[in-house]
Image: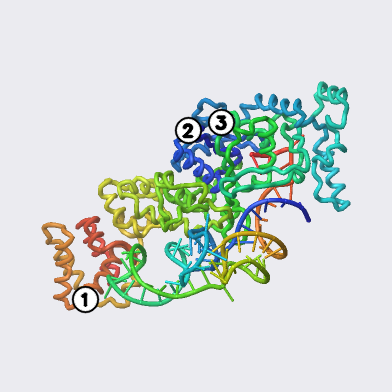
Amino acid sequence: MKKVRVRFAPSPTGGLHLGGVRTALFNFLFARQHNGTFVLRVEDTDQNRFVEGAEQYIWDCLDWCGILPDEAPLAPGECGPYRQSERKGIYMQYAQQLVDSGHAYYAFDTAEEIENLRESLKAQGESDWQYGFHTRHRMRNSLTMTKEETEALLSADFPHVIRLKVEGNEMIRFKDMIRGDIEMSTNTVDDKVLMKADGMPTYHLAVVVDDYLMKITNAFRGEEWLPSAPVHVLLWKYFGWEKDMPEWAHLPLILKPDGNGKLSKRDGERLGFPVFAMQWKDTAGKAVDGFKEMGFLPEAFINMLALLGWNDGTEQEVFSLEELVQKFSMDRVHSHGAKFDFEKAKWFNHEWIKRLPSKELADRVAPFMQHAGIETGDKNTFVKIIDLVKDRCTLLPDFIKQAAFFFRAPQHLNLEAVKPKWNDDKNNFFVALIHSWQMMQEWKHDELEINFKEIAAASRLKPGELLFPLRIMLVGDKFGPGVFDIIMLIGKEETLQRVSKALQLLK
RNA sequence: GGCGCGUUGGUCAAGGGGUUAAGACGCCUCCCUUUCACGGAGGAAUCACGGGUUCGAAUCCCGUACGUGCUACCA
């Protein structure tokens, strides 16, 4: 049995999309599960689309998610280099091999010529033109020219590409781990360009050569690649590497929440949710926040992504990375796309906030608090606060509102909620309460509560109708954990100060 | 247009011939809590449509419709 090797092969062209992270995740899970190797290969063969910093960014995203690869440009292994631009020199010989064996040919048609031809045919109502087995004989290529003519053009460095020569009327069959047997006719696949005029390989040549050279055993990619899979299968065959061809798995698409179609960055902006894992700054300096900045825990992000197109068949929905490694299986991945549901994504985060130990959570929350100008101070106290409010927080920034009043008196008191039922009796109660609490030797939860109830009873008022105003005085509004829990944490001095101040305002 | 892939509630989905068609999110109604949450109980699907096969079909087969992807010297 061959050692499992998988690769995530993104193009460094911008922010890392949800779907990309999921592909990386499935690769990671599969590799870990089979004690295999997870490779990150950067597919930067398109020099026009190359974006500075995108590669480091991809690494950072995977790092944040906790699914770093074993081999990558930044962590070289045996099969480097891991950037296709740096492998430029090795593709030509393989393309040449195909030319020599008659499976590829030189084509000298310029992009303009082809475009013009396509346009004119379109005008005649022939819209499905493609450079292929029934048209290649009308074009300028080494199949239609004499050997001498071809040689002359080549030695004169006339711009050219190398195209795959796809024979017609052949059925290509291959197995997809998710969809089972797939069958397609070569009649619908065109003579794909293998080597571009700039000397770079196209995706088609590069994936096959690199997957072979990197000994990839399982190739996972998005469903949008399915139509060109025959090209790749053909390439594996023409190279004579058929027995080493990886097992394919074409992952279902992640669709936009409304309507249909692939989820795009624009949808996120339009509907108000992130699409990238982490913040991406484009070359113009415009930044788009990702799940991280939005306050997602990587545990939740990964969990949510795993369940987008996969489930283990039980009712379990919350999985840790370790559990996913254990339970993930490609044959339970769906063959149809799923609409992205941001509400459900938030639910996953809420679940993870509730589950993560408060001590751990505190470290994740602290940066958000600091960003809001709140110093979290003593860690033990902060952990207690986190423990008290975490049920109420869905995204990490929610902690700012839910916990701020522990650190500073509320800026604004929602007295409107209290005033309608405010009266002298209540006022007198609080005056008595302040007096009594000032005398307290020890500041203990149960004793404070007992004392509170005693004074209430003496004032012939129900504790409930007094607890509510007290909450407003301490928190500023109608939310937060138990009033006495709050009192314990903010302490005697602060408690009495807030109550006194509120009483002034209520006069 | 051609080719591929797909189609169970608003969304994610379990289900692989016989079930009252799970569960989750969201929504709605209650309970708990005189806050907000958490927690708990409940409510809502003629399984795209039409034909078959079968004693019996969400499940198998064939059509149709619809959706989506690809159809670049982009990946």
| Residue drawn at x 39%, y 46% as measured from the top left | A367
Q: Nearer the viewer, residue A311 or A396?
A: A311
Residue identifier under label 3: A215
Residue A66: x %, y % from top left: 44, 41
Would residue B60 be found to the left or right of residue A152 on screen? left
Residue identifier under label 1: A462
Q: Quadrant of residue A443?
A: bottom left
Do the residues indicated by labels 1 and 2 lie within the same chain of the protein? Answer: yes
Do the residues indicated by labels 2 and 3 lie within the same chain of the protein? Answer: yes
Q: Earlier in the sequence, mark 2 or mark 3?
A: 2
Residue A205: x %, y % from top left: 67, 33
Amino acid type at circle 2 is: Asp
Q: Chain of mark 1?
A: A
Would residue A383 be found to the left or right of residue B18 on screen? left
Q: Which mark is residue A70?
A: 2
How far separated are the C-alphas under marks 2 and 3?
A: 14 Å
